[in-house]
Amino acid sequence: MLFKQQALLRQKLLVLGSLAIGSLLYLVARVGSLDRLQPLCPIDGRFGPHGQEEIPLRALQFKRGLLHEFRKGNATKEQIRLHNLVQQLPKAIIIGVRKGGTRALLEMLNLHPAVVKASQEIHFFDNDENYAKGIEWYRKKMPFSYPHQITIEKSPAYFITEEVPERIYKMNSSIKLLIIVREPTTRAISDYTQVLEGKERKNKTYYKFEKLAIDPNTCEVNTKYKAVRTSIYTKHLERWLKYFPIEQFHIVDGDRLITEPLPELQLVEKFLNLPPRISQYNLYFNATRGFYCLRFNIVFNKCLAGSKGRIHPEVDTSVITKLRKFFHPFNQKFYQITGRTLNWP
Ligand code: A3P
């Protein structure tokens, strides 16, 4: 009997102990993440009309919490009013380059407490139908944010679409523009791989990369092939420079963002005049994925979708050499214009 009572007591203590440890861990997780997400501008810790809404601003900035709900469009009119939430036009846009690492860059910048990302590619400036809907339509596509935060969107098609620089200029001539680039041949192969995957999904056959990238009649690089043209970065940039001075652009090294993301992100923080808030803690290497993943706090982390980081098909080395030789003079010009030299072959 005594033994039975002792066993019962031990069991109760075990349950209580586990509950206490669980709560403690939860509190540490929450406080840890909230501390990291300190407000960036001097707004009072408590707000709301007549102080009845006693929610510390820090708590509201817990990105995976309340604000996340707001972003999903669940905010009631009352919540939006109480928390001063707004849908702001972007202060910075990742304009390209397709397959440069645009998604990784956007997601990583979103780790910053002062940055709020537009999750979807909006394609406002490159799509005539969307553009015709007007700037208010575009603004309404933006996530809810606090007035001191900045909104960033990414639509990689902007970089290569003729009409876009003028249209963005008309919206905001002092907007900051981010371009993430990768070694041009690798980028072209990545571009091809994405299209190839789409064809395979539809059970369609597709040409080999070599056949598309090299003109079979001249045996020269086929500049009509879109994946090749997109990688001639300097040609596209020159169109943008008719509207914006080079100081309004920041070049992100997409190859380095893969292997060493933090220093690249720190350069972007500086360019956007944001205090440095993204740290090594927020980025961890996931050996299974073979890429860095994102850590918001000890509870929430995420890797990019499987469509990012595809295995590229093997490409004939002579074709790679030909392409690299072709891109070389354009790359030199790109370094010269941007003032950023990248170690491309
Ligand atoms: P690959 O699929 O060729 O490897 P985008 O988002 O502009 O389409 O770019 C996709 C590329 O982002 C991927 O190209 C991948 O290499 C790169 N990338 C950079 N950082 C990444 C990360 N942390 N996780 C997954 N992919 C990343």
Image: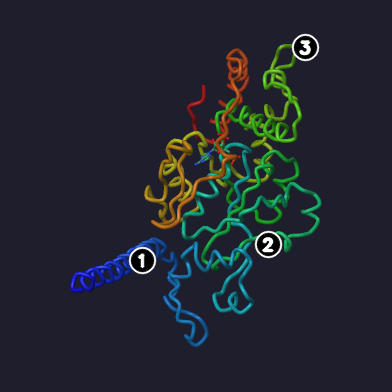
Mark 3 beta carbon near ligand 1 (under 8 Å): no
- Write the residue at 69% across / 56% down: 171
Give the residue type at disc 3: Asn
* Gap between marks 2 and 3 measured at Cα: 48 Å
Give the residue type at disc 1: Val
Q: Nearer the viewer, residue 204 or 259?
A: 204
Give the residue type at disc 2: Arg
Instruction: Decide: is 266 above or below 135.
Output: above
* Gap between marks 1 and 3 measured at Cα: 65 Å
Q: Residue furthest front?
A: 1
Residue indicated by mark 1: 31
Residue indicated by mark 2: 139
Q: Residue furthest left?
A: 2
- Identify the element where label 1 is drawn: helix
Q: Position of residue 243 (x, y in %)?
A: 67, 45
Q: Earlier in the sequence, mark 1 or mark 3?
A: 1
How many residues crowd around disc 1 within 10 Å: few (fewer than 14), some, or many (20 or more)? some
Q: Nearer the viewer, residue 338 or 27?
A: 27
How many residues crowd around disc 2 within 10 Å: few (fewer than 14), some, or many (20 or more)? some
- Identify the element where label 3 is drawn: loop
Is any part of residue 272 visible from this angle? Answer: yes
Q: Position of residue 5 (x, y in %)?
A: 22, 73
The structure's colour scheme is rainbow
Q: Earlier in the sequence, mark 2 or mark 1?
A: 1
Of circles 1 and 3, the one toward us is: 1
Q: Position of residue 24 (x, y in %)?
A: 31, 67
Q: Earlier in the sequence, mark 2 or mark 3?
A: 2
The quadrant in which the N terminus is found is bottom left
Of circles 2 and 1, the one toward us is: 1
Residue indicated by mark 3: 217
